[in-house]
């Protein structure tokens, strides 16, 4: 493995680290990889998961919900994966969101979000309260982002597929926290994904540095006074790390680095020729980058990351000069759309941009479904929007999204079609067992659990359907299917049989 490292990368790392430390760094490439998963505390308490986990878990020191699992274990092949109880994530990639210090109720942007490892981590920190806007410029990558948010049952995310400069029109000064997990040359991925080495040789570090500079500038304009940006990369080059932060600080005097403890420090001494222009930065900026963090594969159990935490002064007008973005019109709770229907169809499940919101869709079938199947709690504090025949619950306080490519304006609830309502898989995944009036909870040891995930019809006695004790009607119709009390999808019960509504693209293979 070490033989295949790009020669230029080797030379550069020897120059930066010195011969002795380079030897240790190089030796880490021959060490076994670390495997990590992060418990989705949006669905299950950390300790409850640990108690029932079939995996051998060891805590990741810097991530409250992160664990190493052992090589050979396959968490992607377990019913709990299908229930969204965890996300498989490289351990050092868990650090940036920890340092973002998200609190429930905040407005958070994940600017470069796909496939959603860090977005789902932010969502768990928000605990369903506040606004999570996630964006990625590549539409093919947005599909995976949408699927991961749905799998993990996120209810308050808005998914965009747009250029950050267009987002400024809507979100100037709006966010409390912004994560920029920047596109980068990926030097920290060489051990995990060897093909990254080939890509490194094709792309220049300078290409990425230019993108990162732009992203940092755009994010600054969307941050509210007193807010925080976390900038992270999975690469080692100072041009993409310390130099980006030093340059940003010099252009944005209202920002400072919030020093990070517990990791190796950023390297002001690497702001030098031939990698960076030695005289390009102020003394303030150079000193501040010592407060950034470097996660090195030879110093901890992880592939490597760079993280900088940038705080904006509370008394600042905001980098964009405005206090906050305009909130959307209308009530912030669950409301009916009114007016004319556009007739255009939303592109459900495809990760493609939606048509503009439509009005005048009759919500009666959805209301009937909610009355029959759900307790009122799931939609509280949200606003219903219909795009074509598709209904979404948008987070409260979201600005109007005019002019943006909106892939998901909120939690996808389902389709209103020819006077009927079809609940979405995302609705099932975002619910809790206690929120359903009709449910089936299979034990993970029950062979029907796996058969459900494979898409099979199941034999289910009426007495197995969980319902309100006062319910007298037959259990016929939609039913929330759970495994060990965690929702995995819908089924339709009739006369002892459960028709399987688990979507084909999600099935166990
Ligand atoms: C390092 S990856 C993000 C990984 C993600 N944060 C996670 O944890 O799963 C960087 C992402 O930035 C996206 N990207 C590249 N240029 C962008 C831009 N100008 N605006 C927004 N996203 C961009 C890429 O498509 C890629 O998905």
Image (cartoon, rainbow, N blue to C red):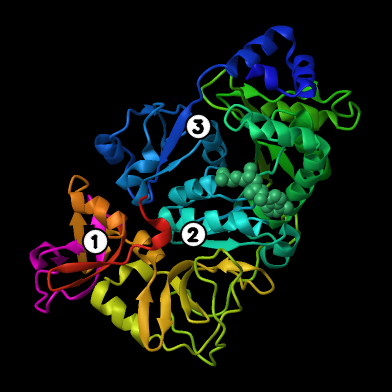
Q: Position of residue 320 (x, y in %)?
A: 75, 58
Task: Give the answer, above or below, for where 147 lies relative to 102.
Answer: below
Q: Nearer the viewer, mark 2 or mark 1?
A: 1
Residue at which label 3 appears? 91
Q: Residue furthest top?
A: 20
Q: Which residues lie in the magenta part?
A: 458-487
Label 2, secondary structure: give it.
loop
| In-front residue for pair 351/363 | 351
Instruction: Indicate which disc, 2 or 1, sits on the residue closer to the N terminus.
Output: 2
Q: Position of residue 399 (x, y in %)?
A: 60, 70
- Residue 259 visible, this angle: no
Q: How far apart are labels 1 and 3 at the CA level?
A: 32 Å
Label 3, secondary structure: give it.
helix
| In-front residue for pair 331/451 | 451
Crowding at mark 3 (Cα within 10 Å: few <14, some 14-19, many 20+): many
Q: Position of residue 500 (x, y in %)?
A: 28, 65
Q: Is 111 within the magenta?
A: no
Q: Is 459 within the magenta?
A: yes
Q: Residue at x 50, y 70 (%)?
A: 348
Q: With 271 as the anchor, is 491 left or right in this view? A: left
Residue at which label 2 appears? 130
Task: Give the answer, above or below, for where 481 lies relative to 301.
Answer: below
Task: Give the answer, above or below, for where 320 lies relative to 9.
Answer: below
| In-front residue for pair 320/372 | 372
Label 1, secondary structure: give it.
helix
Q: Nearer the viewer, mark 1 or mark 3?
A: 3
Q: Position of residue 166 (x, y in %)?
A: 73, 64
Instruction: Indicate which disc, 3 or 2, sits on the residue closer to the N terminus.
Output: 3
Q: Are marks 2 and 1 in contact (CB under 8 Å)?
A: no
| In-front residue for pair 11/52 | 11
């Amino acid at each position: 493995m070490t033989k295949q490292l790009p020669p230029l990368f080797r030379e550069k790392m020897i120059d930066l680290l010195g011969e002795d430390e380079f030897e240790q760094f190089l030796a880490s490439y021959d060490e076994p990889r670390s495997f990590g998963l992060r418990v989705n505390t949006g669905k299950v308490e950390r300790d409850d998961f640990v108690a029932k986990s079939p995996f051998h878990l060891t805590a990741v020191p810097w991530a409250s919900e992160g664990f190493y699992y052992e090589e050979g274990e396959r968490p992607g092949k377990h019913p709990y994966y299908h229930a969204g109880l965890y996300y498989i994530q490289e351990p050092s990639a868990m650090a940036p969101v920890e340092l973002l210090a998200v609190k429930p109720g905040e407005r958070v942007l994940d600017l470069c979000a796909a496939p959603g490892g860090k977005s789902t981590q932010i969502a768990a920190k928000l605990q369903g309260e506040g606004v999570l806007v996630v964006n990625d410029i590549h539409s093919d990558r947005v599909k995976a982002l949408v699927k991961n948010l749905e799998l993990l049952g996120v209810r308050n995310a808005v998914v965009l597929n747009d250029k950050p400069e267009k987002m400024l029109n809507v979100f100037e000064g709006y966010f409390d926290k912004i994560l920029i997990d920047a596109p980068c040359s990926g030097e920290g991925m060489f051990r995990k994904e060897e093909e990254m080495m080939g890509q490194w040789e094709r792309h220049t570090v300078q290409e990425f540095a230019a993108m990162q500079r732009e992203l940092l500038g755009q994010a600054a304009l969307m941050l509210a006074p007193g807010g925080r940006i976390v900038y992270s990369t999975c690469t080692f080059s100072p041009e993409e790390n310390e130099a980006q932060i030093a340059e940003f600080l010099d252009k944005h005097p209202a920002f400072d680095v919030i020093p990070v403890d517990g990791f190796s420090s950023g390297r002001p001494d690497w702001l030098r020729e031939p990698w960076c222009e030695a005289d390009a930065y102020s003394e303030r900026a150079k000193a501040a980058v010592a407060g950034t963090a470097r996660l090195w594969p030879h110093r901890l159990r992880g592939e490597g990351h760079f993280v900088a935490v940038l705080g904006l002064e509370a008394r600042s007008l905001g980098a964009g000069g405005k206090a906050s973005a305009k909130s959307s019109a209308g009530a912030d709770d669950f409301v009916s759309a009114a007016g004319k229907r556009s007739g255009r169809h939303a592109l459900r499940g495809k990760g493609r941009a939606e048509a503009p919101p439509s009005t005048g869709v009759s919500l009666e079938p959805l209301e009937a479904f909610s009355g029959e199947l759900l307790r009122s709690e799931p939609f509280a504090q949200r606003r219903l929007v219909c795009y074509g025949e598709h209904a979404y619950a948008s987070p409260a306080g979201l600005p109007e999204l005019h002019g943006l490519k909106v892939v998901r304006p909120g939690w996808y609830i389902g389709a209103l079609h020819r006077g009927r309502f079809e609940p979405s898989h995302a609705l099932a995944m975002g619910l809790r067992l206690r929120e359903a009036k009709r449910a089936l909870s299979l034990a993970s040891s029950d062979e029907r659990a796996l058969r459900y995930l494979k898409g099979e019809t199941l034999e289910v006695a009426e007495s197995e359907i969980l319902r309100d004790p006062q319910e007298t009607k037959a259990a016929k119709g939609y039913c929330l299917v759970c495994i060990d009390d965690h929702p995995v999808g819908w089924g339709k019960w009739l006369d002892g049989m459960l028709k399987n509504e688990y979507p084909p693209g999600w099935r166990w293979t």
